[in-house]
Amino acid sequence: MGRIIAVVNQKGGVGKTTTAVNLAASLAAMEKRVLLVDFDPQGNASTGFGIDKKKVEATIYDFLAGKATLNECLHTVSSPWLSVISASSDLAGAEVELVDEENREFFLKNALQTAADDFDLIILDCPPSLGLLTLNCLVACQGVLVPLQCEFLAVEGLSQLLNTVELVRKKLNPDLEVEGVVLTMYTQGEGLNDQVVAEVRQHMGESVFTTMIPRHFEVSESPSFGKPVVWYDPWSSASWGYFNLAQELINRMKTREEGV
């Protein structure tokens, strides 16, 4: 069964979707069978892979609602190792529709049971909130990856997110654990950035990935071309950051499997 990892941060603008998209592309480049599920009604992860949301016939909303099968929702992209399930604004309506449903926190988990055996990793791009959609992701996954921008305002919300993860682990998903915190938009030598890095590493210890994603203009530019930055400019410092992050994630998974 493939490992399901939710990329979560309730604060917008921290590189959450960028991390989900480029991590998925980097893992696929390492010949891991990867499924990226866009679970954000904004659908930015879909755009990041050049998927025209207006032309999509079946989205994650249709899959959850039982209106489409998994195969009908899958989009193939440039890599044969990577598939994407896109999202649209309809997903925002799903949050309202689920409120009165029994076991509403388990809809995504139940839906993904059919996909788990077909992929090595399933990456969930969560919305920038801690609502019912994100709760579904936390219940469905085994690991939480937290992108954290190197600024103090981003750090302030980290404790709230970690408390939510711990609450979900106790009440709904005993298998849930923090996969790691990845520091994003880092500028080397900038005093404030370095202070944030030192503070986060002091408090989170080994939970923080060694790899940091540097700030690079092509990270912002690549979505307009419908490509992850690791495809758009694979030799950029940001691309190497995501490749290293993918390798570090694989190493952590291997260590966990070996029981070390």
Image (cartoon, grey):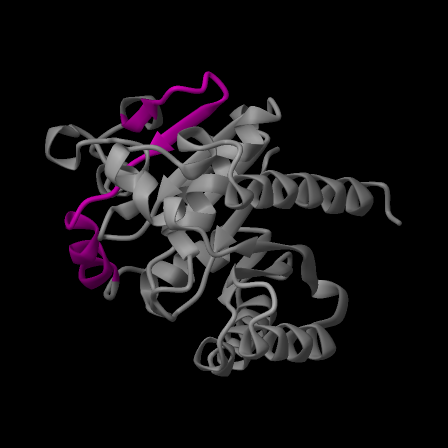
Q: Residue at x 56, y 36 (%)?
A: 121
Residue placed furthest toward the top: 80
Q: Looking at the picture, does residue 241 appear above or below residue 178?
A: above
- Is residue 74 inside the magenta stretch? yes
Q: Is residue 250 above or below residue 183?
A: above
Quadrant the N terminus occupies: top right
- Horizontal side, residue 88 vs residue 124: left or right: left
Does 257 sit left or right of 42 as displayed?
right
Q: Nearer the viewer, residue 8 or 241?
A: 241
Instruction: Give x and y (percent) for residue 221.
Output: 31, 44
Residue extent of the magenta highlight: 73-98
Percent x, y of residue 44: 27, 47
The residue at 33%/49% (across/down) is 220
Image location of residue 135, percent across then percent down: 41, 63
From the viewer's perspective, tell me whether residue 50 is left or right of residue 77.
Answer: left
28 shown above or below 190: above
Tell me, yes or no, whether the highlighted magenta stretch contains residue 134: no
Residue that extends furthest to the right in the rendered view of this protein: 260
Please say whether residue 136 is visible from this viewpoint.
Answer: yes
Give the total of numbered labels. Answer: 0
Q: Is residue 89 above or below residue 14?
A: above
Say which residue appears at 53% left-offset and 64% top-offset: 172
User: Which residue reaches farthest front?
Assistant: 189
Looking at the image, residue 227 sits to the left or right of residue 244; the answer is left
Q: Residue at x 52, y 40 (%)?
A: 239
Looking at the rendering, which quadrant does residue 51 occupy? Answer: top left
- Residue 84, percent from left and from top: 36, 31
Kindly tell me whether residue 114 is visible in this rendering: no
Question: Front-most of 210 and 190?
Answer: 190
